[in-house]
Image: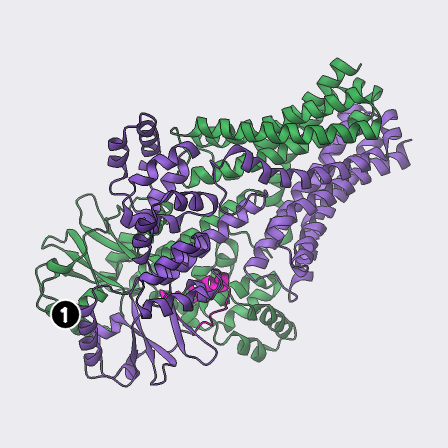
Chain colours: A green, B purple
Amino acid sequence: MNSKTHQQVALISDALERADEETAISHLEGLSPAEIASLLESLPHSLRPALWPRVPSAEKGEVLLELHGDLRRALIELTDEDELVASLSAMQMDELADLDEDLPIPIINAMVQAMDTQRRQRYEAVRDYPDDSAGGLMDVDFAAVRADVTLKAVLRFMRRIRRHDDQLPEHFDSLMVVDRTNRYIGVLPLGDLISLNLEATVADVMVTGVPGITPLTPAREVARLFEDQDLLSAPVVDEQGQLLGRITVDDVIDVLRDEAEQEILSRVGLEQHEDMFAPVVRSSVRRAVWLGINLLTAFAAAWVIGLFEASIEKVVALAVLMPVVASMGGVAGSQTLTLVTRGMALEQVGRGNVLRLLWHELGIGLLNGLFWAVVVAAVAVFWFGDLLLGIIFGVSLIIGILTGALAGTVIPLTLKRMGVDPALAGGVVLTTATDAIGFFAFLGLATLLLL
Amino acid sequence: MNSKTHQQVALISDALERADEETAISHLEGLSPAEIASLLESLPHSLRPALWPRVPSAEKGEVLLELHGDLRRALIELTDEDELVASLSAMQMDELADLDEDLPIPIINAMVQAMDTQRRQRYEAVRDYPDDSAGGLMDVDFAAVRADVTLKAVLRFMRRIRRHDDQLPEHFDSLMVVDRTNRYIGVLPLGDLISLNLEATVADVMVTGVPGITPLTPAREVARLFEDQDLLSAPVVDEQGQLLGRITVDDVIDVLRDEAEQEILSRVGLEQHEDMFAPVVRSSVRRAVWLGINLLTAFAAAWVIGLFEASIEKVVALAVLMPVVASMGGVAGSQTLTLVTRGMALEQVGRGNVLRLLWHELGIGLLNGLFWAVVVAAVAVFWFGDLLLGIIFGVSLIIGILTGALAGTVIPLTLKRMGVDPALAGGVVLTTATDAIGFFAFLGLATLLLL
């Protein structure tokens, strides 16, 4: 999405409000499906139905693929059935399989009817796998060649099939090489095909380093593999090594984008494909859950404070300073938590080094605790003229920050072992711990030493 | 990085501690440079120097490319100069240009000396552009063909150059097409080259839709373009349209990965390539800055509370409940902030729809505020048996949540206009606002109505 969009959103929404469809359409021209999708997401709820019919039928399928959740379903409902089927039947199998969770059964049936036998088999092959698995990502319209033929024969073969069907496989950088039983044995990069000796056989020149991916491999592992091995495409093979399909780097880019988006949104309890302009009530209900969870945390902290009402009544300064201890523990903890969660996602944190990591984080916490303890103690003494209060304030700050370091390391690892996504729940659990212990340490010490 | 790494980190670090280098090396075998880099990052500081010499010289350059900051510089210092130069001179120009900020001048000179004239010119061409621009990403070792030749001639040409130099351009999916003055005019996909009529000219079959990217285009815009147009590679052209180089999708994947990592780490004040095992003191100093900034926020909130010491002294329940108001405002605000920041990054939020977005968020805030106000009021009445206190508590919760919605929308837009990255500073500014206003609303109302 490049910066022309700003103005386009403005122009198009004005045009739509004036019911000036010509103008609206004119601003759609030359946009890619992804750009149209982003544009629709940028439009307020009320204006989207007006724009959708103006999107060229041929592109509707691709645009829907770029959208998600409610918005996608809403637009599907707005689309004429035949138009939808026509637009979908032009799409790739793996794309279709991503969409169909949101397609009404009759549409799917009509679509499958319209397919020739080969396409139908391929479609069913892909549909059987979860969207976030290698099988769900794979493309089944690909070209494979035998290892025992010459490059010249491959070139002849390519020209022949091209004459019959004009469509090339998407992101066509290499040919898969199989043996006579369709077992995957290597890859023939097109660059080698066009530049090496025509009399050589595929077997002579093929690349054998690219591993076959099994269809149930999780999408994020596939992405990691593409990154680590710098691949443009990779074969998907079953347990017997039979070639099932081909994953291309564009699918991997989508996986990376989604992974990042989910990590960022789920930290604040938003869903992955949160719609900026979803109806207010629906958005409110979704967010209410997260607010409710955090309310429990807040009341837990309040309860801890409640234990020390008597002390606060005597020394009001405690009420003034206690949020500082809690928040500093939370901030230090969130730094550790983020670092550890990242490390776990990159598989860099495990049994091999977690203890070292914990000591490392505690060391950092101790140094920063000591440093800032002196600062805050000075502030407190200057503010309230009470040395002991300052010392108690400083000491509990150290405790708070160390709590943050400990919780920030232990919580994500524990959550993962429990099968909970640390990026989702980590922050809440951390705050609960750092708030409660922060308040308890400060108010507790004060009660012991000050009163 | 796949899950074998866990055990490898454990095995290798044990081996290194036992100074059993054979074992350590044996576990390195078959790892890609990216995997070795990730492994080094997973190892504690003390063990890295022991492993580095065991990394095959040929791969050291690629591994360094995957590393960043202190770790990269430290390992460069540990590498023998001739070995380093040899390993680097095998690398691509754009990769070299990414590395050289961390290379000592003598190494760079030695490297440039070792280059032939052509490579030297290309290297200097890339080095002049910032790393995070199209020019910094582009690869200059690419093949271009003229539009007026036949496909057959192109194939002959490819075979000829391949015979002289065995290296193919990386991620070789297409040929750039230029006119006789080297102006970029189109792209010839290898798939078409091998499957279309040999007598056709390049001009007949070339794809003209792929736009030329100017060298100073920011990397994140390049990434967006690759995503939106689903590209494997794209040409870089100067203002006159002269073909300068070629950007491939693997560079884009790195950009996306870095973008996501930075967004996540900078939210808690960590730097983009934070080293999990950097020396404790260095890590502490870096994080101290962030803790200091947040300490100011915390004291600002404490100051607000200080204004109402008298009220708290009379009604201690205020001290117990006030953190709830502040934290709920912060949570609601962080949801809005995250959503708006995302929208801005995807260019989906702009003058065209920001007002609508603000109303949308305020609407959500109002609904959730009303709902949770009733809940917390009930809790307060039940807890402290004071109806008026409950009402004040509920009303200020609504104010807190609305403040969050307002601040969460306005802050990122204001920061961006000021040229500050919202992902970096947004959270702190937000908390300052929600805490201060939350405490002020609750304690202020209580002082007016309760005392």
Q: Looking at this view, is A122 or A355 the one in front? A: A355
Q: Does the magenta stretch include residue A283?
A: no
Q: Position of residue B282 (x, y in %)?
A: 54, 37
Q: Looking at this view, is B32 or B318 the one in front? A: B32
Q: Is residue B222 magenta?
A: yes
Residue kind at label 1, given as amino acid type: Phe
Q: Where is residue A382 in the image (x, y as percent from the top left)?
A: 82, 30
Q: What element carries label 1?
A: helix
In the rendered structure, the answer to whether residue B432 lies left or right of residue B131 reads: right
Residue at 40% across, 73% down? B244
Check the picture and name the quadrant holding the C terminus of chain B: top right
Q: Where does label 1 land, which residue?
A: A157
Q: Looking at this view, is B408 or B73 the one in front? A: B73
Residue at 43% across, 37% down? A344
Residue at 39% across, 35% down? B43
Q: Looking at this view, is A137 or B239 the one in front? A: B239
Using the rendered view, name the quadrant where residue B138 is placed: bottom left
Q: Is residue A58 visible?
A: yes
Q: Where is residue A296 in the image (x, y as percent from the top left)?
A: 64, 31
Q: Residues in magenta?
A: B212-235
Using the rendered view, name the quadrant where residue B21 is placed: top left
Residue at 73% across, 30% down? A376
Q: Residues within 10 Å of mark 1 (few under 14, many from 20)?
A: some
Check the picture and name the quadrant holding the N terminus of chain B: top left
Q: Is residue B324 shown above or below B214?
A: above
Q: Mark 1 lies on which chain?
A: A
